[in-house]
Amino acid sequence: MSETHRIEQGSEFLPKFDSQGLLTAVAVDAAKGDPARLAEIAAAVRAEAPPLLLMCKVLGPNPRAIVLGLSMFAGTPLYYMIYQAVVLNLLLVVSVLMHNAAARRIAAKIGA
C-alpha cells in the first residue's frame, strides 16, 4: 500500500498538518497534566471569544427573523432575499476572517 493511500484511505488516524493545522489542539493535549498551562490556554481563548460570539449572534436566526418581518411589513420578500444573498454572505466572510485571525493570535499566545 502506498503512503498516500495509507494516509487518505487507511484505518489509522493520520491528520494532515500544514502551517496552520491542529496546533492549538496539540498544545491543549500536551497540557493535559498541567493545570496552570490549561488555565493559560483557557484565558487566551476567553480573551478572544467576545467579538467572535457577537458575530455568531449576528449570523444567527433572530436577526433573520427580524429582517423577514420587516421585509413582509414592506410588502415584499425581495428585501429578505437580498439580505440572505448579499449581507449574510458578506458577514460570513468577515466572520471566517475574524475566527482565523483569532485562532492565529491564540496559537501565538499559547506558544503552539
Image: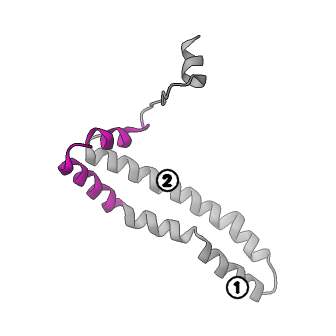
Where is the N terminus found, in terms of image quarters?
Answer: top right
Residue type indicated by callout 2: Leu
**In the rendered image of this protein, does residue 103 appear above or below residue 11?**
below
Q: Bin the neighbour count of mark 2 within 10 Å (Cα to Cα): few under 14, some 14-19, many 20 and up.
A: few
Q: Bin the neighbour count of mark 1 within 10 Å (Cα to Cα): few under 14, some 14-19, many 20 and up.
A: some
Horizontally, is 46 left or right of 79 in the view?
left
In the current view of this chain or complex, which residue is farthest to the bottom? 73
Residue 72 pos. (x, y %): 77, 84
Residue 21 pos. (x, y %): 44, 37
Give the labeled residue for mark 2. 97
**In the rendered image of this protein, does residue 36 appear above or below residue 73?**
above
Give the labeled residue for mark 1. 70
**Magenta-drawn stretch contains 5:** no
Horizontally, is 21 left or right of 80 in the view?
left
**In the rendered image of this protein, does residue 73 appear above or below residue 68?**
below
Where is the C terminus found, in terms of image quarters?
Answer: top left
Residue 78 pos. (x, y %): 79, 75
**In the rendered image of this protein, does residue 74 appear above or below residue 62?**
below
What residue range appears in magenta?
20-48
Residue 66 pos. (x, y %): 65, 81
